[in-house]
């Protein structure tokens, strides 16, 4: 059976996005199509079962145990979604039992009350209940008894698959939410009916049939009672239910194992990264931690969401001076910071710019980290001239001079979309506070806060509000400064000095005195080269994981397609009709996906 091929390859596809929920739905789909267990020619055919059900209903009507059922529309050949297997019969719920049954009992009988919240969407989860006196709940609620089947009819409960076989009801009867359709099956396995009600074919076909206004849409009674239902022989119903329970239990185990595996992997990754950035680690300990962590991280990193913490670790190592070795022959940072201070003084003398003001350097302990030998701390204000147009918005036009806004400044990169413009005449009047130069830094002050990138634009452009241009007073590696500002060390520092709740922002006056860790200029260049190389490896790892995710999705799609294909059809025919590659080629491709090694 093609379905067995899918289950054999489950481990390869389980990592695909939404694989487990899709496989659960798929098992139900196989069940109601007769593809989950083999048909047995010795089974009493479903047509005979329907005759016995009809006879029982007639007996109950004659005995006045139930009312005469309402007539329902017979099925037409065009109504049938797929061919029924041999021995099966197409029927309807109205033919299989009593719709909307009523209970008769003494008011003081202990019964069960079942609100919608106690009916599960997941297969195999029993209904909950609350003991109540029957007299308190018999009016104004839906009736049911042990063995009845209930279907949630209101959105979004129906779409989510809320339905149940009522069991363990106090006193054997109950009442509950009015948003239920109920059937009391006769001679039919109630659990098989639940398979049908939770199957993708029934739910997906029912969604467009719902009536009512948004948020109050309901499944019509006629859809519940008269939809085509594929009925197997009773013995096969029981085999199907047993197989579904077996497969759902297997999926539960595999999902639990995957969750545990991912949890362990996440804890190992977090611990490895934390040891790398531990502030009290000595050189020897750090080297050992680095060798272990970077050797194992590619194997531990199996999801795209794990890439960003890896990138952040690289940045945190860089800003702490742990990414490259210090060279005692490098000129210390304090020496070239003197040159920057002299350049700042000269700029004030030459321009008279009121924005350029004397400011003290930060104290050595201003940063929540130990500075390596030869490093210093310096403030934003002493490193950069702030060019900003906060609080003002120029009139925009459909063409003209490009306007760089906070939307263009992403974390680590400048994007030219969305594109906005101002008129050339406006540009000349607008850019009065200075012109950004190549290599300057752009920083967003809010919405979002603290995105940072390098200016790479050669043609004239204007700056909008919420963007500050950091223009160095003298030579410094602005790529190093960008990486430093991107690190958690500085991002957290900026966040601590920001204001606002939902939309945080930072004023220039609060940003200017904040410290930045400054290595010797030569070490800045070495750090930048190493970060660039490691980020490229992260990009490759991300690409490999993306390829793996895509391949798993293709493999899952192909296997699902093959499993629903009648067994007699040849594989070449399946391959021609499937939009995906064959399962075999997808599985091979998945095996070939490799992760790049990361080394310091």
Image: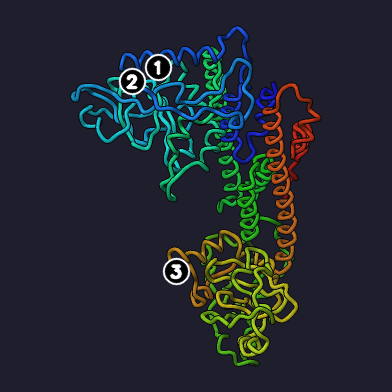
Residue that numbered label 3 is attached to: 499
For the residue carrying disc 2, how many other residues have a C-alpha within 10 Å: few (<14), some (14-19), or many (20+)? some
Using the numbered discs, state the Cα–Cα distance from disc 1 to disc 3 in whole angstroms. 72 Å
Earlier sequence position, callout 1 versus callout 3: 1
> What secondary structure is found at the residue carrying circle 1?
helix
> What secondary structure is found at the residue carrying circle 3?
loop
| Residue 460 position by quadrant | bottom right
Location of residue 452 in the rendering, given as x and y in whole percent from the top left corner: 62, 67
Q: Please name whichever residue, 236 or 375, is drawn nearer the observer in this view of the structure.
A: 236
Q: Looking at the image, is 484 positioned above or below residue 560?
A: below
Q: Which mark is residue 57?
A: 1
Residue drawn at (67%, 40%) of the image: 296
Using the numbered discs, state the Cα–Cα distance from disc 1 to disc 2 in whole angstroms. 8 Å
Using the numbered discs, state the Cα–Cα distance from disc 2 to disc 3 in whole angstroms. 70 Å
Residue that numbered label 2 is attached to: 66
Residue drawn at (52%, 66%) of the image: 494
Assess whether mark 2 and mark 1 are in contact (beta carbons under 8 angstroms): yes
**Image side of residue 97 versus residue 513, left or right:** left
Location of residue 77 in the rendering, given as x and y in whole percent from the top left corner: 61, 28
> What secondary structure is found at the residue carrying circle 2?
loop
Residue drawn at (79%, 30%) of the image: 573
| Residue 567 position by quadrant | top right
For the residue carrying disc 1, how many other residues have a C-alpha within 10 Å: few (<14), some (14-19), or many (20+)? many
Location of residue 416 in the rendering, given as x and y in whole percent from the top left corner: 69, 69
Q: Please name whichever residue, 443 or 312, is drawn nearer the observer in this view of the structure.
A: 443
Q: Residue furthest top?
A: 42
Q: Looking at the image, is 332 positioned above or below residue 587?
A: below
Number of the front mark, 1 or 3: 1
Residue drawn at (32%, 32%) of the image: 142
């Amino acid at each position: 059976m093609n379905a067995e091929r899918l289950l054999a390859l489950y481990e390869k596809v389980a990592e695909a996005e939404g694989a487990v929920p899709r496989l659960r739905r798929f098992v139900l789909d196989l069940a109601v199509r007769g593809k989950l267990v083999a048909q047995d020619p010795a089974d009493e055919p479903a047509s005979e079962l329907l005759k016995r059900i009809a006879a029982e209903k007639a007996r109950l009507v004659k005995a006045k145990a139930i009312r005469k059922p309402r007539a329902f529309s017979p099925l037409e050949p065009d109504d049938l979604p797929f061919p029924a297997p041999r021995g099966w019969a197409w029927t309807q719920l109205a033919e299989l039992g009593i719709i909307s049954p009523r209970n008769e009992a003494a008011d003081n009988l202990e019964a069960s009350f079942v609100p919608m919240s106690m009916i599960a969407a997941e297969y195999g989860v029993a209904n909950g209940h609350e003991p109540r006196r029957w007299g308190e709940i018999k009016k104004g609620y839906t009736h049911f008894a042990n063995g009845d089947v209930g279907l949630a009819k209101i959105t979004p409960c129906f779409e989510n698959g809320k339905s149940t076989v009522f069991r363990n009801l106090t006193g054997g009867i109950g009442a509950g939410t009015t948003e239920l359709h109920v059937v009391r099956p006769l001679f039919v396995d109630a659990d098989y009916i639940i398979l049908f009600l939770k199957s993708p074919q029934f739910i997906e076909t029912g969604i467009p049939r719902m009536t009512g206004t948004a948020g109050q849409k309901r499944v019509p009674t006629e859809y519940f009672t008269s939809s085509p239902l594929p009925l197997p022989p009773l013995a096969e119903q029981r085999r199907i239910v047993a197989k579904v329970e077996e497969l759902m239990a297997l999926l539960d185990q595999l999902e639990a194992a995957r969750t545990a595996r991912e949890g362990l992997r996440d804890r190992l990754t977090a611990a490895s990264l934390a040891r790398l950035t531990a502030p009290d680690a000595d050189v020897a300990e750090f080297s050992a931690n680095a060798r272990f962590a970077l050797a194992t991280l590619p194997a531990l990193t199996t999801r795209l969401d794990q890439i960003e913490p890896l990138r952040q670790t690289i940045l945190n190592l860089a800003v702490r001076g742990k990414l490259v070795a210090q060279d005692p022959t490098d000129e210390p940072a304090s020496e070239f910071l003197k040159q920057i201070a002299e350049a700042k003084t000269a700029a004030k003398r030459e321009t008279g710019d009121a924005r350029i003001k004397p400011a003290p350097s930060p104290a050595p302990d201003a940063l929540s980290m130990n500075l390596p030998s030869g490093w210093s701390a310096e403030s934003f204000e002493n490193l950069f001239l702030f060019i900003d147009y906060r609080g003002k918005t120029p009139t925009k036009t459909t063409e003209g001079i490009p306007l760089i806004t906070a939307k263009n400044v992403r974390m680590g990169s400048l994007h030219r979309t969305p594109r906005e413009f101002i008129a050339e005449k406006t540009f000349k009047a607008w850019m009065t506070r200075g012109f950004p130069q190549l290599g300057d830094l752009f920083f967003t002050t809010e919405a979002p806060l603290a995105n940072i990138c390098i200016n790479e634009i050669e043609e004239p452009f204007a700056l909008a509000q919420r963007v500050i241009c950091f223009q160095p007073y003298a030579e410094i590696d602005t790529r190093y400064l960008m990486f430093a500002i991107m690190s958690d060390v500085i991002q957290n520092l900026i966040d601590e000095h920001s204001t606002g709740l939902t939309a945080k922002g930072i004023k220039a006056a609060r940003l200017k005195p904040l410290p930045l860790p400054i290595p010797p200029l030569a070490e800045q260049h070495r750090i930048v080269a190493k970060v660039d190389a490691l980020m490229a490896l992260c990009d490759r790892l991300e690409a490999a994981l993306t390829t793996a995710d895509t391949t798993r999705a293709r493999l899952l799609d192909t296997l699902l397609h093959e499993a629903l294909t009648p067994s007699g059809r040849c594989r070449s025919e399946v391959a021609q009709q499937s939009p995906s590659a064959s399962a075999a080629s997808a599985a091979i491709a998945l095996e070939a996906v490799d992760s790049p090694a990361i080394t310091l």
